[in-house]
Structures are given as C-alpha cells and as structure tokens.
Image (spheres, helix red, strand yellow):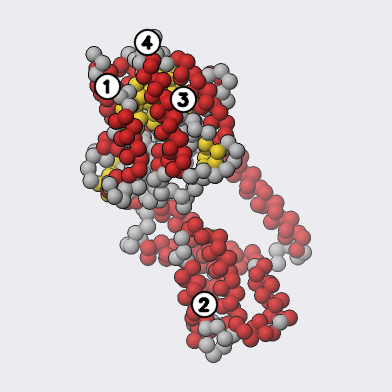
Amino acid sequence: MASGCLLFIGLQKRKYIEQFFEMVPPILVIACIIGVMYLPMSLARASTVLVVFLTLVLITSLKEGKTLYAFLTHPKVVYIGLISYSLYLWHWGVLSLSRWTIGIHWWSVPFQVTLMFGLAVASYQWIETPLRKKNWFGKRWKTFMVGGGVIFTLSGGLIALKRPLKSQLYTGKLINTAEPNFLKGKKCLENISNKTECYLVNNNSKQTLWLLGDSHAKKLALAGEEVSNSLGINMKLYLGNATSFPPVGRYQKLTINGRQLLDDFKIVEKELYKQMKVGDVIALFMRMPAHFGGSYSSTNRPFIVINEEGSHISKETIFNEWITSIENLADIAEKKGAKIIIQTPIPEWIRQRQFRRCSTSDIQWFNSLNKINCEIKSKFFIDKETGIYKHLFEKLNELSTSHKNIYLFDMYKIVCPESTCSFTKDGIDIYEDDDHISSEWAKNFLSLEIYKFIAEIQNMDK
C-alpha cells in the first residue's frame, strides 16, 4: 500500500518516470512476476520485495492500446480484483482445512477452487460491501465505536468459551502418546539448570546404563527403561535439546539456552567420570547429521554453530573435536571397565515437508484420503560416493575399529533394512516427526534390538 502511494506521488511529480516505464512490455513484467514465484523459499523476503517492485512497474507500463490492457480491464477480470480481498481471506482457510482432511489432489482442486470463489463472492456481496458502503449510524465515530464493541464482545465470548468447550467439539478419536515424566535441574544433578532433563531407573544394581544425548535420546526413554529392566541394571538418561555429548564447547546458535545446556552437560560429564564402574554401558544417541554435517534441513532451520566465544564453527571442525572427546572418553571407560555404544545416524524426512501425511498412527475418518506412503532411497544417505552420511559412517567405523570398547549400534539398518527407507513399518509409525523416532515404536520394537546388542557385547567378556 505504501509503495502504491509512493508510486502515485512519483507519477504526479515526475512525469519522466511514467514515460520511462511505458516502454517496458507488460507481458514481460507478468512473466517476471510468475518467475519470481518459483524462487526457493530461502529467498522469500527478496522475492516479496521484487514482486512489489514488478507490480509497480506493471501498473506504470500498462496503458490503453496494449494487449494486456484489454485483458486486465475486462469486466470479469476486474470483478476478480474487486473480490480479491475476500478471496485472499477465504483461500487459506479452504487450503488449510483441505490439508488437514482430504488433502489436495488433482481431482479435488476443481471443488476447492469453486469453494474459494463461492465463499469470496458471498462474503464480498453480503458482508464486505454492505459493511463498507452502508451508512450505519449517521456519524463515522459512532460506527467505529459500535463496530469495535461488537468485535470486543465476540472476541471476549470466544476467549470465555475456550476452556468450557476445550476437547468438546472434536469429532475424531483421541490419540494418546505415552511419554514418561522427566525430571529437571537439581532433581537430576546438583548445580545443573532446569533446562537439562533426566529420566532415572533404579534397579538396585551395581551397573548402570547411561543414556546420553539430545532430544533423540529423549525419545528412547521408555525403550531404555525396558532394556534396563530386562538386564536388571540401573538407567540414567540425561538429555539437552540440540546438544551433543560429550560436550565440545560448541552449541547451536538458534537453540534457546544453548550455552546453559552446554555447561550442564559438562557437569553431567564430570559426574559420569566420577560414577563410572565396571560393567557400565554408556550409550550415546543424538542427531548426528545436525551436529556434524549431513542434515539437509538448512532451508527450514539453519543449524549455525558457535563456540563459547561466539565465533561460527564449521561442522567438520566440530565433528573432529567430538571424535577426540570420544577417544578420551573411551580411554577413561577402558580403565574403569565400561563400554561405549554409539548410535549410527538414521534416515530423515526433511524433504517430506508434510511428514504428517506419512503417519498412520493418527488416521481419522476425516483425513484418511490425505495419507501417503512416504519412501526415500537409502543410497541418498549412505551411498559410498554420494551419500550425505558418508563422512559420518567413515569416522564412526574408524572409531569402533581403533577402540575395542567402542561399539556401533547400527540403528540405520534397523530403521531402513532395505534399499528403500519407509516412514512406517508393518503399518506402524517408526517416526514421530521428520527426524525423531517414535517413543512408542522405540519401546515396543527398538528396545529388543538394544537389549540384544548390549547382552551380546556383555557376553564377550565371559
């Protein structure tokens, strides 16, 4: 709107502006506007500014006698312009409800477009036009006062009804996801903040399963409990969102409280060294691609890593530092008779931007048509030449080969045993979102694999 006002003033004051842009073919400007719409989302801000500028050029260059002028001034096209605000308001509601329910398909598009236009026409004719043109109360200030009062009353009524109507209008089946109660702060360890969470299982054993990592470790809490109970050992799970273990003096820039979580993990590391005993198992579960390179989610949320001084650090540097810290942990663990398990990275579904459509666990009567079978070729991740996880597997294999007490738990093969990776297995969701394992799947299926793996490496010493 501001750009339009500036254009009007400019054309009034500086006629040469109009004369210059009159030479630009409107067809070319339209083509450029359409082309901008195909630019990547990472250029959204620049694209918006560019579209505004091109629109100003189009307005200025569009003159009577030009081919595009006759089309854009046709009564039916002008009518679309008149209802454009109503169309703008209604189209998103139709698209959102469609995505939540039946989805958007080739066969549904005609119905959805018809619904958008039908609602826009009705809204323009019976709501927008009467409200804008009718003389309601004689004086404008009275109209504003009454309109504001109506808006306030309706808004207040909706807020007041929020609690009484909560969960009362839903017509689907409620889906409950089992999640344990995590402890925080001093309930986990002295001197750590409430930003770090833990889950503790006491089986009165001399041995402990240490489950350490980021939010991916959190999803294995119930699985870890199953494993520790089956082995008859204790479990101590400590997690820091978007924070790797062992801590290497680096943290994600966009992670809230990243520095605090790093400091907390240093305390956890000291406690681990202090309490570690013969027979303990230290299991490291984390989203390695995000920490050490291989994640392709930069267009959604860039994982910019900085050191404690605030300088940006490359993922390669961080990975090398983490490898060094793992080797140090392995040396200490070997002296104390403990073993280290490192989880291999797993496939992610960042490219499947609507990953919820992949899920089978939340199928309702109103969204079954919107579900799709999500698959991705395994070679995209682990191909020896082009796989984005290639460097991760190479370094991890070197670690396990060079240290006899480091074992790789190949979670990748468990999640993706075939050449094609799937979001679900036997009709059950493996994933909770685009990169986290489902807590329920981990408890019911992955826990058995972890148990067998730990039991096997423990039997090697017998």
On screen, 219 above or below 141?
Answer: above
The residue under label 3 is 238
User: Are the residues tagged 1 and 2 within 8 Å (C-beta)?
Assistant: no
Q: Earlier in the sequence, mark 1 or mark 3?
A: 3
Q: Nearer the viewer, residue 186 or 123?
A: 186
**Mark 1: which secondary structure?**
helix
Q: Is residue 269 left or right of residue 137?
A: left
Q: Earlier in the sequence, mark 1 or mark 4?
A: 4
Q: Is residue 63 left or right of residue 302?
A: right
Q: CA distance from mark 1 to mark 4?
A: 18 Å
**Mark 3: which secondary structure?**
strand
Tell me the number on the disc at residue 207: none
Q: CA distance from mark 3 to mark 2?
A: 57 Å
Q: CA distance from mark 1 to mark 2?
A: 67 Å
> Can you say which quadrant of the picture contains the C terminus?
top left
On screen, 317 above or below 69?
Answer: above
The residue under label 4 is 205
Q: Earlier in the sequence, mark 3 or mark 4?
A: 4
Q: CA distance from mark 1 to mark 3?
A: 23 Å
Q: Nearer the viewer, residue 296 or 229?
A: 296
Residue at 42%, 16% (x, y): give it: 276
Tell me the number on the disc at residue 29: 2
Disc 2 marks a residue whose amino acid type is Val
Q: CA distance from mark 3 to mark 4?
A: 19 Å
- Residue 247, how many percent across, how many down? 49, 30
Q: Earlier in the sequence, mark 4 or mark 2?
A: 2
Label 1: how many Cα within 10 Å (few below 14, some 14–19, many 20+): some
Disc 1 marks a residue whose amino acid type is Ile
The residue under label 1 is 457
